[in-house]
Image (spheres, rainbow, N blue to C red):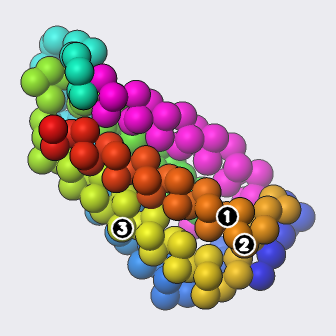
């Protein structure tokens, strides 16, 4: 199924079971990211940290930048559910980024974020396999590879938060 949202006005697509499972798993992670941010609102100090903390931070910066790109893509596609998710996705990533800038960083919520986002990415790979969904002219295989790379980044993030 090729996403043709670029030619439509605002609409709501039918995502099916795997699409909703992906969304729910990622939302759990995003709630953890927003909660981590809320926990650090009263903290005044920021620090980049050192060692593996910096690696986790760099990975989170990359993921946050991807969430900005997703906002633009979803706005262009004009799919309502995806756009709402993209906004929450951005807030969750940036919220967690701000929280991780606090040293010593909160560990539990970033781990929950990373694990559920990893599970969401793995579910997305299954969604792509089952539905054949593509967008922006990408092949199904390319989209699955991108999802797998993102899954690996979230897995590495969890590992570096744990260390």
Q: Are marks 1 and 3 in contact (CB under 8 Å)?
A: no
Using the rendered view, name the quadrant where residue 15 is placed: bottom right
Q: Tag 1, which secondary structure?
A: helix
Crowding at dot 1, Cα within 10 Å, few <14 / some 14-19 / many 20+, comes out as many
Q: Are marks 1 and 2 in contact (CB under 8 Å)?
A: yes
**Image quarter of the C terminus:** top left
**Image quarter of the N terminus:** bottom right
Determine which of the numbered discs, if any, sits on residue 140 in the image. 2
Using the rendered view, name the quadrant where residue 161 is placed: top left
Residue, disc 3: 119
Determine which of the numbered discs, if any, sits on residue 143 in the image. 1
Asked whether, in this view, residue 31 is left or right of residue 117, the answer is left
Using the image as rendered, state which of residue 109 and residue 75 is in the foreground. 109
Residue at coordinates 52% horizontally, 71% vertically from top-left?
124
Tell me, yes or no, if residue 68 can be seen here.
yes
Q: Which SS type dominates the magenta stretch? A: helix
Asked whether, in this view, residue 105 is left or right of residue 119, the answer is left
Q: Are marks 3 and 2 in contact (CB under 8 Å)?
A: no
Q: Position of residue 141 (x, y in %)?
A: 70, 70
Q: Position of residue 119 (x, y in %)?
A: 36, 67
Residue at coordinates 34% horizontally, 46% vertically from top-left?
156
Q: Position of residue 100 (x, y in %)?
A: 24, 30
Q: Which residues are magenta?
A: 54-81
Q: Tag 2, which secondary structure?
A: helix
Using the image as rendered, state which of residue 37 and residue 127 is in the foreground. 127
């Amino acid at each position: 199924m090729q996403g043709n949202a670029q030619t439509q006005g605002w609409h709501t697509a039918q995502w099916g079971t795997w699409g909703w499972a992906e969304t729910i798993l990622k939302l759990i992670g995003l709630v953890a990211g927003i909660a981590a941010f809320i926990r650090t609102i009263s903290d005044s100090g920021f620090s980049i940290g050192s060692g593996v903390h910096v690696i986790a931070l760099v990975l989170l910066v990359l993921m946050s930048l991807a969430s900005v790109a997703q906002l633009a893509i979803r706005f262009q596609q004009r799919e309502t559910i995806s756009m709402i998710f993209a906004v929450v996705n951005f807030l969750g990533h940036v919220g967690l980024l701000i929280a991780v800038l606090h040293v010593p960083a909160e560990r539990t919520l970033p781990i929950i974020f990373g694990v559920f986002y990893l599970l969401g990415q793995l579910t997305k790979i299954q969604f792509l396999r089952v539905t054949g969904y593509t967008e922006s002219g990408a092949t199904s295989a390319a989209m699955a590879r991108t999802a797998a790379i993102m899954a690996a980044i979230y897995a590495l993030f969890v590992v570096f938060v744990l260390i």
